[in-house]
Image (spheres, grey):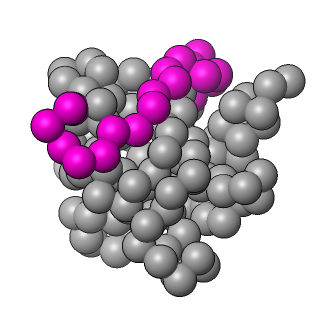
């Protein structure tokens, strides 16, 4: 198993923590000098904060751990391609490398819709490696949303039942 796969598995563990509490299963891990300095998972629904994405929470923790907003030499592992907000935070925090699992066709800003991480007009670019354990990362997401749709369908069906009939 490569280092990228090893650390992505840790990010997948974080994604599973999110799923257990009803959050979209996205997890992130930041590694610097061969050491995990931050772990996080989506908490948007739990905290009712638009910015509570796994990457943002991990970056915030890594900055506290290192005592610096500059995360030079760090690698961020995340189970889903970063969105525009997270890509911006990655660039601003000077993360050196981003490794993601599943592509995000609706919001991915690390190569799918655009590539903010390697935009030469910014003062920092991050190296990007994509598709690491993509099937496993994508499966977590697709199964989660399939269950969510089924739950909504079941709620709709039970609301349509009339006990007086």
The magenta stretch spans which residues?
A: 119-139
Q: Is residue 130 left or right of residue 11?
A: left
Residue farthest toward the right in the current orientation of the protein: 1
Instruction: Say which residue appears at 53% left-offset and 83% top-offset.
Output: 67
Above/below status of 61 relative to 20: below
Instruction: Say which residue appears at 33% left-offset and 39% top-offset.
Output: 125
Q: Is residue 164 left or right of residue 117?
A: left
Examine the structure image and report whether residue 71 is included in the region drawn in magenta: no
Instruction: Say which residue appears at 77% left-offset and 52% top-offset.
Output: 34
Q: Position of residue 141 (x, y in %)?
A: 47, 32
Q: Position of residue 10 (x, y in %)?
A: 71, 46
- Towards the viewer: 60 or 119: 119
Q: Is residue 78 left or right of residue 111?
A: right
**Whether residue 68 can be seen here:** yes
Examine the structure image and report whether residue 138 is included in the region drawn in magenta: yes
**Quadrant that contains the C terminus:** top left
- Towards the viewer: 157 or 128: 128
């Amino acid at each position: 198993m490569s280092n990228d796969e090893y650390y992505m598995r840790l990010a997948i563990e974080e994604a599973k923590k999110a799923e257990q509490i009803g959050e979209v299963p996205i997890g992130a891990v930041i590694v610097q000098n061969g050491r995990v300095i931050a772990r996080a998972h989506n908490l948007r629904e739990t905290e009712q904060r638009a910015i509570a994405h796994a990457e943002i929470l991990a970056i915030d923790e890594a900055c506290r751990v290192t005592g610096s907003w500059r995360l030079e030499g760090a690698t961020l592992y995340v189970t889903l391609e970063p969105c525009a907000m997270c890509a911006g935070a990655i660039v601003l925090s000077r993360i050196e490398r981003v490794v993601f699992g599943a592509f995000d066709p609706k919001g991915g800003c690390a190569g799918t819709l655009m590539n903010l991480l390697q935009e030469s007009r910014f003062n920092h670019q991050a190296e990007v490696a994509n598709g690491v354990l993509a099937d496993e990362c994508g499966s977590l997401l697709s199964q989660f949303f399939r269950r969510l749709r089924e739950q909504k369908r079941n709620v709709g069906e039970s609301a349509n039942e009339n006990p007086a009939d």
